[in-house]
């Protein structure tokens, strides 16, 4: 792999806090190595800004391994940038070339208000999980792990859905700001497992109702979410959610 | 002074007896007791869920925007449990034995035995929560092997085991939030422990969005705040992982145990340059199928695929035929360092060795798949294609991650790997009940020192975190809180809260007012360099003495020349980081003092002066069979307390993996 360095122009969203209007600022960064990660490029810029006595740019990040779901940059019109199936922190600078201009914004959605610069508030996702994204199994009450064999095919599908990292890119990509891919991933993960069967109906109804309350838009199935999801969560989960929802709505005692 | 409160009786009966006799709190009283849990990784989230289920009023804190993002999420390879589902001779005793031996005889027998006992319950609990562990075609749970053992006892979910376990614990926690039993404080950083009449009674936390300081009362305080590997700047830990919570407790009187016991993990993606912000682990599970080698010739510049089989040195298989590539981490790391130091390293920096999957991809998986499909005499291309499918299922996400970072395809060329800081066995000293020496202050998970001795075996940290949270503290905390049922919540206007808050706010103002020239990051990097070079994979007395002086000088420079932009009362990540780096600097000094005091090599602590003729760690059991628990006495001053380790069941010997 050939390495190279590049100079770039960055246009980054700056916003002091939730109550202040924001705007783009332009920065120049020099001698960026193609081996750096995108966030390491931001580290370089921030170090430079601090040394120059200017405000660094606030952004969320933690694991830098594509698994915590904390990083959340909208890069050149695409959540997490140009690479397929990749989080912002795993995007590397070899995706860019010398002289490029890169525009970086926060996730934009009513249910994800901006906290500062590129940092948004995603606690609405936690509240959706609180509404039913779990199996009620008190500690200490479990039967032996092998007591209930689970068809490998189903277990694999449940795992694929459970791989969602809760980053919110699906919402950011959706023209309706729908959280359907996120919600359907959790509904599918738990509905596919025998352990999740007992609460299956109330779970889907309550999670969807919470999603609506939080101000996420409705799903018109444009599939923009799947295209940007860093964990490649499939829209087939949305179809499963819809089926679960209809059955639950028809048969639930709450309805 | 150091009472580890290990119950009397036979090893295998201690925990059962303890549970049968510890004090209980009745359900009505539980509702009146408030518990503060700092940290929502595996240890904290599981404790919060389990204690809230029992009826306690829980307040939980994390500095990320959601409890689901704790560093535990990044654990890859798996979690151990003595289930013996594979019928290969595993048992509670064997897991206990492997852990004590792997820890090079520097862990407590009673704690480790308890860990092995509850390990099986963890798997059951996680399956009940819907954790999608890997399964076999018959629908039963699958296992893989990990280093330092000869049985298959590791449960896993591809290379995302930590994620799946944490999501399980997080969902259990969120369920309790919905039920009103847990109040969750996201984007909050605990900055002080409040001690009243000798007992931990609360914390001071900073809201990281507004910068405001808050006072919170609890009848007990649990620190589940993870490890301190980031003292080395570069490590496999998440960027935010830090020692601050544990360090504040230490400054308030809690002893810090075995700080120098650090784990350097053998298989990480090598450093590429100065811009590097963190290192990425390639799970130990890869050593099941990857073979580690370097060229037999020094300074060989040929590409890996151009080096013929007979010119490759599979140095772990050569040195340790019984365990081969699955020796414990400390042993594998040192062996890789030895080869690189001797001039056999690969890649542009020569600070790397190969981890090669081709052999097993073809011979193990490729052939197995071909014979399953009834293909006679398959050609190599067919075997490679079949093998790739299996390897993808086992480790797909790790291979993708490697490719994203390096731009190389590990299905085609061997991975280049090098050891990196990964885990800290040291931590807050706790007794059998997981309580520090400050009454009412507990520590769980990686933040405590308790179970791994001088070296942790792979897949045992997840086990310990969940054991502590789901199955240990729910019993032991009752033994303390049973005597607290008459204690009314103390109003946070109490002068102890007042003084604690003032000391935190004074320190923040001091930091902001330095207005120096150098960035926080630059100090952190310099500290990391000192620690890596002088208190890293190999240590010696002279280097450690130099390091102590350098760190003291760095501390002075930090407190007179650090530059923190922005304001106090707003979101200010540089300020958050500055406080953490200031604590890392103090910890770094203590780590060097501890490493200097321990005149022996054991597990991950390798003092060059103490090695066998063939370069293995040489313990000094007659002088150092103790836990080093340090008490802070003042600036640059610590007093050592020793907890003698007694081995009633296992006889310590020179570890042998040959
Ligand atoms: C890349 C990687 C892979 C690993 N793979 C494995 C594996 O396969 N198997 C295995 O057994 N182990 C593995 N480990 C080790 C294991 O993941 C950790 O030891 C374990 O997850 C630690 O869990 P914890 O709950 O103790 O702490 P953490 O998960 O680190 O959680 C710490 C929590 O404390 C909070 N916190 C910290 N300080 C404060 C403060 N001051 N105020 C408020 N909140 C605070 C954080 O927000 C977080 O919620 C791996 C580690 C790494 C780095
Ligand atoms: S579904 Fe994908 S994009 Fe949406 S939150 Fe989950 S991982 Fe992120
Ligand atoms: S920082 Fe964790 S997913 Fe990007």
Image (spheres, coloured by chain):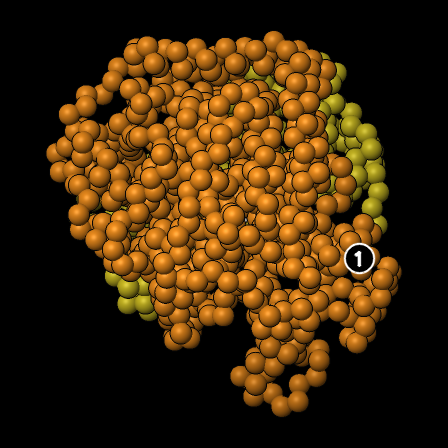
Chain colours: A yellow, B orange
Looking at the picture, how far across and down is residue B487, in whole percent?
19, 23
| Placement of A100 over or under B602, stated as above or below | above
Number of numbered markers: 1
Residue in front for this viewpoint, A122 or B619: B619
**Residue at the bottom extreme?**
B376
Quick check: B379 above or below B591? Answer: below
Foreground pick, B238 / A12: B238
Q: Residues within 10 Å of mark 1 (few under 14, many from 20)?
A: few
Residue at 83% x, 38% y: name it: A5
Residue shown at 30%/43% (left/top)? B5
Element on which disc 1 rests: loop
Q: Would you identify the image quadrant in which residue A91 lies?
A: top right
Residue A47: tell me if it is visible. yes
Measuring 61% from the left and 56% from the top, which residue is drawn there?
Answer: B617
Tell me the quadrant of the picture where the N terminus of chain B can be found. Answer: top left
Where residue B405 appears, x then y in whole percent?
69, 49
Asked if A245 appears above or below B189 in the picture, the reply is below
Q: Which residue is mark 1?
A: B342
Q: Position of residue B560 (x, y in %)?
A: 66, 14
**Which of the two residues, A21 or B69, is positioned nearer the viewer here?**
B69
| Residue B204 point in image, percent of width and height | 40, 20
Picture residue at 82% right of the left edge, 33% below the top:
A31
Q: Residue furthest front?
A: B622
| Left or right relative to B100: residue B366 | right
Determine the image quadrant of residue A208. Answer: top left
Q: Chain of mark 1?
A: B
Considering depth in this image, is B175 or B479 the residue closer to the camera?
B479
Residue A217 visible here: no
For the C terminus of chain B, the quadrant is bottom right
- Is A167 placed left or right of B33 in the picture? right
């Amino acid at each position: 792999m050939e390495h190279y360095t590049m100079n770039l122009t960055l246009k980054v969203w700056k916003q002091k806090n939730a109550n202040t209007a924001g705007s783009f600022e332009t920065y120049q960064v020099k001698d960026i190595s193609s081996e750096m990660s995108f966030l390491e490029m931001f580290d370089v810029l921030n170090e430079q800004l601090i040394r120059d006595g200017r405000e660094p740019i606030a952004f969320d990040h933690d694991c830098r391994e594509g698994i915590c779901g904390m990083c959340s940059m909208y890069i050149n019109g695409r959540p997490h940038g140009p690479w397929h199936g990749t989080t912002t922190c795993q995007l590397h600078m070899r995706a860019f070339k010398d002289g490029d201009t890169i525009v970086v914004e926060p996730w934009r959605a009513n249910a994800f208000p901006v906290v500062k610069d590129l940092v948004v508030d995603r606690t609405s996702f936690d509240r959706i999980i609180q509404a039913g994204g779990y199996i009620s199994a008190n500690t200490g009450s479990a039967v032996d792990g092998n007591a209930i064999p689970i068809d490998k095919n189903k277990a694999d599908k449940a795992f694929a859905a459970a791989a969602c990292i809760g980053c919110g890119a699906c919402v950011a990509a959706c023209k309706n700001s729908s959280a359907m891919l996120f919600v359907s991933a959790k509904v599918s993960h738990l509905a596919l497992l025998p352990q999740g069967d007992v609460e299956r109906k109330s779970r889907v109804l309550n999670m969807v109702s919470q999603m609506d309350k939080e101000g996420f838009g409705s799903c018109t199935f444009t599939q923009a979410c799947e295209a940007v999801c860093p964990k490649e969560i499939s829209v087939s989960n949305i179809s499963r959610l819809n089926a679960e929802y209809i059955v639950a709505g028809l048969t639930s005692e709450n309805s | 002074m150091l009472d580890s409160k290990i119950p009397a009786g036979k090893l295998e009966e201690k925990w059962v007896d303890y549970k049968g006799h510890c004090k209980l709190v009745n359900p009505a009283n539980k509702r009146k007791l408030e518990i503060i849990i700092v940290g929502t990784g595996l240890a904290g989230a599981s404790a919060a869920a389990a204690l809230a289920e029992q009826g306690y009023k829980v307040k939980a804190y994390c500095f990320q925007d959601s409890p689901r993002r704790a560093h535990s999420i990044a654990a890859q390879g798996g979690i151990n449990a003595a289930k013996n589902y594979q019928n290969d001779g595993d048992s509670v005793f064997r897991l206990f034995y492997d852990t004590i031996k792997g820890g090079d005889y520097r862990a407590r027998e009673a704690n480790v035995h308890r860990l092995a006992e509850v390990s099986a319950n963890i798997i059951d609990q996680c399956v009940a929560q819907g954790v999608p562990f890997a399964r076999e075609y018959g629908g039963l749970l699958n296992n893989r092997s990990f280093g330092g053992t000869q049985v298959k006892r590791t449960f896993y979910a591809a290379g995302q085991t930590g994620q799946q376990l944490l999501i399980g614990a997080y969902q259990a926690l969120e369920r309790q939030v919905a039920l009103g039993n847990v109040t969750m404080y996201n984007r909050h950083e605990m900055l002080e422990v409040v001690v009243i009449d000798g007992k931990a009674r609360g914390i001071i936390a900073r809201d990281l969005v507004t910068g405001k300081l808050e006072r919170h009362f609890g009848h007990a305080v649990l620190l589940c705040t993870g490890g301190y590997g980031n003292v080395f700047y570069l490590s496999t830990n998440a960027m935010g992982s830090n020692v601050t919570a544990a360090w504040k407790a230490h400054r308030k009187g809690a002893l810090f145990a075995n700080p120098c016991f650090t784990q350097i993990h053998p298989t990480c993606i090598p450093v590429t340059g100065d811009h590097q912000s963190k290192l990425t682990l390639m799970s130990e599970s890869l050593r099941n199928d990857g073979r580690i080698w370097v060229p037999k010739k020094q300074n060989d510049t040929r590409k890996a695929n151009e080096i013929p089989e007979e010119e490759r040195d599979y140095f772990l298989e050569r040195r340790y035929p019984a365990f081969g590539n699955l020796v414990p981490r400390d042993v594998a790391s040192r062996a890789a360092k030895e080869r690189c130091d001797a001039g056999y390293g690969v890649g542009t920096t020569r600070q790397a060795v190969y981890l090669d999957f081709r052999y097993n991809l073809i011979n193990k998986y490729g052939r197995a798949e071909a014979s399953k499909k009834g293909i006679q005499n398959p050609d190599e291309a067919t075997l490679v294609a079949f093998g790739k499918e299996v390897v993808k299922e086992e480790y797909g996400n790790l291979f993708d991650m490697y490719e994203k970072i390096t731009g190389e395809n590990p299905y085609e060329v061997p991975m280049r790997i090098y050891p990196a800081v990964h885990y800290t066995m040291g931590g807050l000293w706790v007794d059998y009940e997981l309580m520090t020496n400050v009454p009412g202050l507990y520590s769980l998970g990686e933040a405590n020192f308790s179970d791994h001795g001088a070296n942790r075996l792979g897949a045992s940290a997840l086990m310990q975190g969940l054991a502590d949270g789901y199955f240990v503290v729910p019993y032991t905390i009752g033994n303390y809180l049973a005597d607290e049922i008459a204690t009314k919540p103390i109003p946070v206007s109490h002068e102890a809260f007042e003084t604690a808050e003032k000391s935190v706010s004074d320190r923040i103002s001091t930091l902001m007012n330095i207005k120096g020239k150098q960035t926080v990051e630059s100090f952190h990097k310099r500290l990391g360099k000192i620690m890596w070079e002088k208190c890293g994979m190999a240590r010696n007395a002279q280097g450690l003495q130099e390091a102590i002086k350098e760190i003291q000088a760095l501390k002075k420079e930090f407190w007179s020349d650090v530059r923190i932009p922005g304001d106090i009362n707003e979101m200010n990540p540089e300020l958050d980081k500055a406080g953490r780096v200031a604590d890392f600097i103090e910890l770094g000094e203590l780590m060097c003092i501890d490493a200097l005091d321990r005149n022996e090599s054991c597990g991950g602590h390798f003092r060059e002066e103490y090695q066998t003729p063939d370069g293995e760690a040489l313990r000094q059991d007659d002088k150092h069979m103790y836990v080093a628990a340090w008490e802070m006495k003042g600036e640059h001053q610590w007093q050592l307390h020793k907890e003698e380790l007694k081995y009633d069941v296992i006889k310590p010997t020179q570890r042998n993996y040959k």
